[in-house]
Image (cartoon, grey):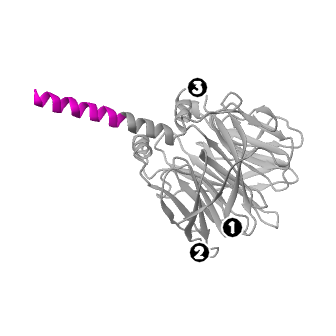
Amino acid sequence: MRARRVIRGIIVLFAASTVIAGLTLMAGAGQFRRIDPHFEGRCTPIEGAVGVEDLVVTPGGRAALLASDDRRARDAASRGGIYIYSLDDGVAPRLLSGSAPASFHPHGLDLVVTPDGRGTLYVVNHELPRGAGHSIEVFDWRATPEPTLTHRATIRDPLLVSPNDVAGVDHSRFYVTNDHGAASPRAQTLEDYTRRARARVVYHDGEETRVAADGLRYANGIALRPDGAALFVSSTTDRRLHVFARDRETGALSRRADVALSTGPDNIDVEPDGTLWIAGHPKLLSFVVHARAPGRRSPSQVLRLRPVPDEPLEFAVEEVYLDDGSELSGASVAARRGRRLLIGGVFEPEFLDCTMDRARAGPTVVETAMLAR
């Protein structure tokens, strides 16, 4: 009888622990958050480029380059592309990456344009079939007389384990986030749910690739501050933005601050004045379900982070856009120039071209000093 009571107690304790762990996981993923959609403006869905996971606005703000791939139909026969979308006329996006490798499935991208007008586009590429490897594809960008992309180089390295996004420094140097330390999907899932901090940032100096930062959880978006002295990295499962001081000569990074966000942050866009735009997943587990089931919606969120004057490690954080997934599910990137705000999603058959009603849109939901380490 006593043994039965002990066994029964162990079972009850195990069940209670499982429930508590599940509730903790759901709370940390934002599953209990109430979604009240809002946006001070209007949005138009633009078709012609599926799965716009990342995008970058060209200098002058007249066009955007889109990383497009049908991730639900990914097989060796499919192919993604880089498209250009004109903000002047709003016509359907046009394919630019005809010179890309045969197995081209773009993920993150970044554009570097120097004062002499020379442009370099860096693109994270996941080759298929699965296990074929990853690479950074490098293109020469020319805006005039006609926008063109010409493939220049393919860069592979053993340190590109699970590349997600890229931040260009100049025409030969760049940073890349590895969102996991493991390469296999099963091991990556285990990393996520056990919250192991194995993600990294790697740096390619034009000749060699080395680890620049490690000990991160799901390192996702990455972007340089316009002056090149700071690097931003989003941690999706930590729901934080990491800020690194950067040595402009050596490329070395030192982690200086973190800021907690109300979402699972994805890609980062930086305006010329240093304002950050971050798209995110307010309900991370809903996004996981959405990735597997197209009919299930995943809420989308866009945050604007404005640097606080005279406080380089502080930002005023504003929620500019929030949607329950009915307008756009799984937003992964947002970029603004003027009143125009472009929002892309990982799997969606269209992206959004939005016009903001006024310069300061959305209520300030968080105003926080970044937490110095």
Residue with the mark numbered 2: 250
Structural crowding at the residue carrying mark 3, measured as other residues with C-alpha within 10 Å and reported as few (<14), some (14–19) or many (≥20): some
| SS at mark 2 in the image | loop
Circle 3: residue type: Arg
Residue 221, compared with residue 72, is above or below; it is below
Q: Tell me the number on the disc at residue 124.
A: none
Please tell me which residue lies in front, 315 or 132.
315
- Image spot of residue 323 (x, y percent): 69, 33
Q: Tell me the number on the disc at residue 296.
A: 3
Q: Tell me the number on the disc at residue 312.
A: 1
Q: Nearer the viewer, mark 3 or mark 2?
A: 3
- The residue at the point 69 percent across, 44 percent down is 302
Structural crowding at the residue carrying mark 1, measured as other residues with C-alpha within 10 Å and reported as few (<14), some (14–19) or many (≥20): few
Does the image show residue 198?
yes
194 to the left or right of 137: left
The mark nearer the N terminus, 3 or 2, is 2
| SS at mark 3 in the image | loop
- The residue at the point 82 percent across, 48 percent down is 360
Q: Marks 3/2: CA distance?
A: 46 Å
The mark nearer the N terminus, 1 or 3, is 3
351 to the left or right of 86: left
Q: Nearer the viewer, mark 1 or mark 3?
A: 1
Circle 1: residue type: Pro
Please tell me which residue lies in front, 117 or 213.
213
- Image spot of residue 199 (x, y percent): 48, 54
| SS at mark 1 in the image | strand
| Dominant secondary-structure state across the stretch colored magenta | helix
Circle 2: residue type: Thr
